[in-house]
Image (cartoon, rainbow, N blue to C red):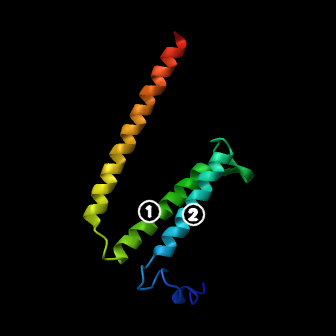
Amino acid sequence: MTDYTILQELPYAIGQDHYEGLAKVGEEMSELGVEFFKLMATGGNPKYWGDKNLHVGISCEVADLYAALDFFVAKNKWFDVGFVARRRKTKLSAYNEWSEETKKLKELRKNNNEN
């Protein structure tokens, strides 16, 4: 059985009144970062030491981070969920716009280099 007594003494942990779940969000962010750095270290090859598939690792950590964020938002009632939803939508739109602009620029460069 897991010993949770140490967690009960720490602020920011699950089960605490002070920003409950904040530590878990940070932990999951860090674990996702590790997987991203592994993928960058392999030059984008998802096959890692010991036949580990980094796509699987990243997928697991993204799911864990989503869960931690959902938990944190639900437990900390000061969150303005409407603001967060609007901000997410705005950011996603910007990222998609940047992606399209970059693809267009890459195509222009390719066409210029071919001529």
Residue 33, image x, y percentages: 58, 57
Q: Nearer the viewer, mark 1 or mark 2?
A: 2
Vertical placement of 5 versus 71: above or below?
A: below
Q: In the rendered image, which residue does mark 2 sit on? A: 30
Residue pushed farthest right?
50
Distance between the alpha carbons at the discs numbered 1 and 2: 13 Å
All told, the count of numbered labels is 2
Which mark is first along the chain, 2 or 1?
A: 2
Disc 1 crowd, CA 10 A, few/some/many (<14, 14-19, 20+): some
110 or 66: nearer the viewer: 110
Q: Amino acid at mark 1?
A: Tyr
96 or 1: nearer the viewer: 96
Q: Is residue 101 left or right of residue 29?
A: left
Tell me what residue is drawn at x 68 percent, y 47 percent: 41
Tell me what residue is drawn at x 58 percent, y 49 percent: 55
Element at label 2? helix
Q: In the rendered image, which residue does mark 1 sit on? A: 66
Number of the label disc, if any, that sits on residue 100: none
Vertical placement of 62 versus 106: above or below?
A: below
Residue 37, image x, y percentages: 63, 52
Q: Quadrant of residue 7?
A: bottom right
